[in-house]
Amino acid sequence: MTILLSTLNARYAHASLGLRYLMANAGELREQMELHEFVIGTKTTEIVEKLLARRAPTGTTILGFGVYIWNVEETTRVVALIKRIAPEIVIVLGGPEVSYESAGQPIVEAADYLITGWGDVTFPELCRAILDGAPPTQKIIAGRQPPMAEIALPYNEYSATDLAQRTLYVEASRGCPFKCEFCLSALDKTAWPFALDRFLGELESLHARGARLFKFVDRTFNLNIKSSLRILQFFLDKLEAAPNDPVFAHFELVPDHLPEALKESIVKFPPGTLQFEIGIQSFNPDVQTLVSRRQNDAKAEENIRWLMTQSTAHLHVDLIAGLPGEDVESFARGFDRLVALGPHEIQFGILKRLRGTPIIRHTETYGLIFDPYPPYTILATDRIDFAEMQRLVRFARYWDLVANSGRFGHTLPLILGDTPFARFMTFADWLYSETDATHRIALHRLAGLVSQWLCLDGYDEATVTAVIARDYAGQGRRTPEEKAAVREQYLAAPQRQARHMDA
């Protein structure tokens, strides 16, 4: 093929929406394009071998890479190897990791061209110029942002295999009007919607082809309530028409904006069909102001409580540790406040310095020290030293294993007691001292460690055994028939969400 598009996804189940946009907007070049997606951790030589096997036998081959924070190091090795073996291949980079602060990046130095920002129409234009023998003289090309109506939507580029095996990413809009300084969307001027009828037509086509799991990547799904209601109604119509063949939809929700009309629509969804990701990030108003985050905490709290008590939506709520101006005590208060609201999952994130984000302006004032290597995680601040930050990192990992996994739904209240953050931190410190590990802890071993800690904490062995049995043994030792019966209740929900609903 003349034009190869490639990226390394974090998991096989992920599918690159960005590269599919490039294919959809390629015009007459589409017939000369192939998409090759890999997974991080794949051997570099294997990736290079597969890509080189598909280069054009004669003439120019263009190889475009989507570069992100999770794959830049491995993609850098791939690019370097290709340039050693086949230096004549023209390599074009794009993606958020190389669109900002590109000077000095080894991957940019090794490549032939870099398109920053929007590449939908700029990438095909560059390819035409290269193939016509009139390549641009500049290496770095600013992507042109066309009117939304001129962007071809990419959903026909999802293959039958994608529909059957992968999460389908969709977007009703791009951009974000908010200016949170830790997010790349802080650089956007506003949000730009696609024409809603056109977008819903694409969803209809995907559904007709068999798609049932849709993940919206919009930063502000509920910003325009009229559009939100029409999108939700699309899924409600599908659920009503075929309750035994349900859909599952995931949206990112602005936490303090949930008017009655939206609530009326949300309550109509049956269990296992709707998930909201809600960014709280911090409950500290001084920290919010510092990072330019506008949020009505009381309203956000009220809305999360309503969603938990009045709807069947699965809630995944985010907090970020390591923000400038926030110490461990402040974060702990926010964590406990969120635990009291009872969301199904609390994503305990550690601040990362994404290239180009304004968070860097606080570096000197608040003593921010970031890892110089991807994913550029915060190592220390003037409020949290390195050792304490490492404790928070381990807390986050163990929280995901024990709480967010849904495997210890009945046991978790015993661990957390009346002071969730303090008690789970104590548990995390003990668990690390016993295992010296945060990964590759087998489920049966983890269950045994949880049981051991609870007994050391003062619970009697009979109580602990019974509650662990309800969780671990109950889920791990079901017969195939019992597992099928549980799964039947939540046909559309991903496995992790189903575990929470079955707790």
Image (cartoon, helix red, strand yellow):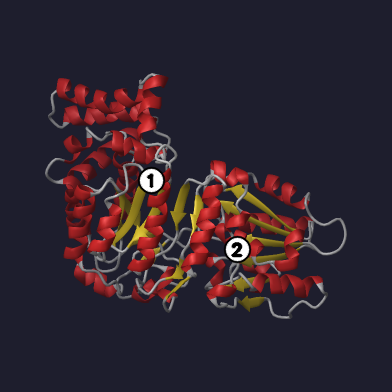
Whether 370 is drawn above or below 139: the answer is above
Residue 275 image offset from top left, x and y in percent: 35, 50
The N terminus: image quadrant: bottom right
Q: Residue at x 64, y 63 (%)?
A: 24
Q: Is residue 56 left or right of residue 221?
A: right
Q: Is residue 79 left or right of residue 460?
A: right
Residue 244 image offset from top left, x and y in percent: 42, 37
Nearest the viewer among 452 and 156 is 156
Residue 470: image quadrant is top left
Which of label 1 and label 2 is nearer to you? 1
Q: Dot 1 surroundings within 10 Å: few (below 14), some, or many (20 or more)? A: few
Which residue of the protein is positioned furthest toward the right in this rendering? Answer: 58
Residue 337: image quadrant is bottom left
> First in sequence: mark 1 or mark 2?
2
Kind of element beneath mark 1: helix
Q: Residue at x 46, y 51 (%)?
A: 214
Residue 117 image offset from top left, x and y in percent: 55, 73
* Residue type highlighted by circle 2: Tyr
* Res. 373 in view: no
Residue 291 image offset from top left, x and y in percent: 30, 72
Return the residue at label 1.
240
Q: Is residue 147 left or right of residue 264?
A: right
Return the residue at label 2.
21
* Residue type highlighted by circle 1: Glu
Q: Residue at x 73, y 51 (%)?
A: 51
Measure the alpha-carbon separation of dots 1 and 2: 31 Å
The image shows a total of numbered marks equal to: 2
Whether 188 is drawn above or below 252: the answer is below
The C terminus: image quadrant: top left
Residue 408: image quadrant is top left
* Res. 236 in view: yes
Q: Is residue 462 left or right of residue 221?
A: left
